[in-house]
Amino acid sequence: MGYSDGRRNDRDHLRSGQPRENGGHRRSPARPPDVCLALIERGDADTANHLLRNPGADISEPGLHRIVDRHGELYDVQSSLVARAALPASVIERAVAAVSFDLVARLVERHKIPVAAAGKLALATRERATLGLTSGLPLDSMRSLVEQLMAGGRLTSSLLLRSLCLGNLDFTIYAIAIQSRLSIDYARSRLMEGDNLKLRELWLGAELPARLLPVAKAAIAIMKDTSIEGMKWDVAFYRRCIVQRLITGVADLSSEFSDDDIKELLAEATGGDVQLQDFVPDGARATA
């Protein structure tokens, strides 16, 4: 049986390794997974971008991973990947870490973010954003992220703790506002007033874990105290200062949270080079 015109053209295209131009009056042809994978392997970034923008291209999960492997650093390819109608969870997880910050917002709004990737994104937005009290994600994107984590109880105490300690206050503000059906501005203003009674009302009204309230109070106070000075620090130093003040200043931190939680927090804040005892004053260490 001979090739159809489409198959013959694909065969010629594979030999050249270059994207085939289609006239504006023609619809993009269908591409089966095996042809897509061959084009991805033999073609260049333009070929990959052309395939991603073709809704008829049935790109397999391995094919999408190969695109990220070969061309994932290119903005045009990132944009086309995010714009796909659907992406496998494993590809979304890689995209969260690879794409530029403006595309992260589109990724969150367009796709259902896997649990692991959503948790990492909730923490990583702080690193990608300008230092301050905002995470940097647009309102709709942060809302989508929080709603996805809340679905099925995925907004865990551990994630809230780490988010607060790493300076991503907006994540907590959105969680409170969405859970309590309040406006974002109202929730933010109430939290930043520093009134313990109002904070408690907001916190418990949003059905957030009561055991996190002391940590939340301390984190908010620290961020308010360091907001001006912190603008001069790099993210790593800012995170380390936040964690140090919390660990040395919140008596209930080590009793309320597991050693694994604290170890993970330290690893995220310091790159894994610091241990809990490094934050304990010498006098306290001697009496321990």
Image (spheres, helix red, strand yellow):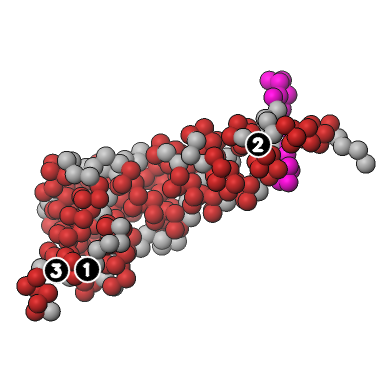
Which mark's residue is nearer the viewer, 1 or 2? 2
Q: Residues within 10 Å of mark 1 (few under 14, many from 20)?
A: some
Q: Where's residue 250, x and y in %?
A: 15, 65
Query: What separation in Å lies between label 3 and label 1 (alpha carbons)?
Result: 7 Å
Tag of residue 280: 3
As drawn, is 209 to the left or to the right of 88?
A: left
Which image quadrant for residue 212? bottom left
Give the secondary structure at mark 3: loop
Name the residue that disc number 2 marks. 43
| The magenta segment | 21-35
Image quarter for residue 15?
A: top right
Measuring 40% from the left and 42% from the top, which residue is drawn there?
141
Name the amino acid, label 3.
Val
Marks 3 and 1 in Cβ contact (< 8 Å)? yes
The N terminus - image quarter = top right
Name the amino acid, label 2: Gly
CA neighbours of label 3 inside 10 A, class few (<14), some (14 to 19), many (20+): some
The number of numbered discs placed on residues in the rendered structure image is 3
| 243 within the magenta span | no
For the residues marked 2 and 3, what is the alpha-carbon distance in whole angstroms? 56 Å
SS under mark 2:
loop
Residue 176 at x, y percent in the picture: 29, 53
Callout 2: few (<14), some (14-19), or many (20+) C-alpha neighbours within 10 Å? some
The disc label shown at residue 276, or none: 1
Q: Main secondary structure of the magenta part?
A: loop
**2 vs 3, front mark:** 2
- The amino acid pointed to by label 1 is Leu
Q: Earlier in the sequence, mark 2 or mark 3?
A: 2
What residue is at 12 percent from the left and 79 percent from the top? Answer: 288
Question: Do we see residue 222 in this rendering?
Answer: yes
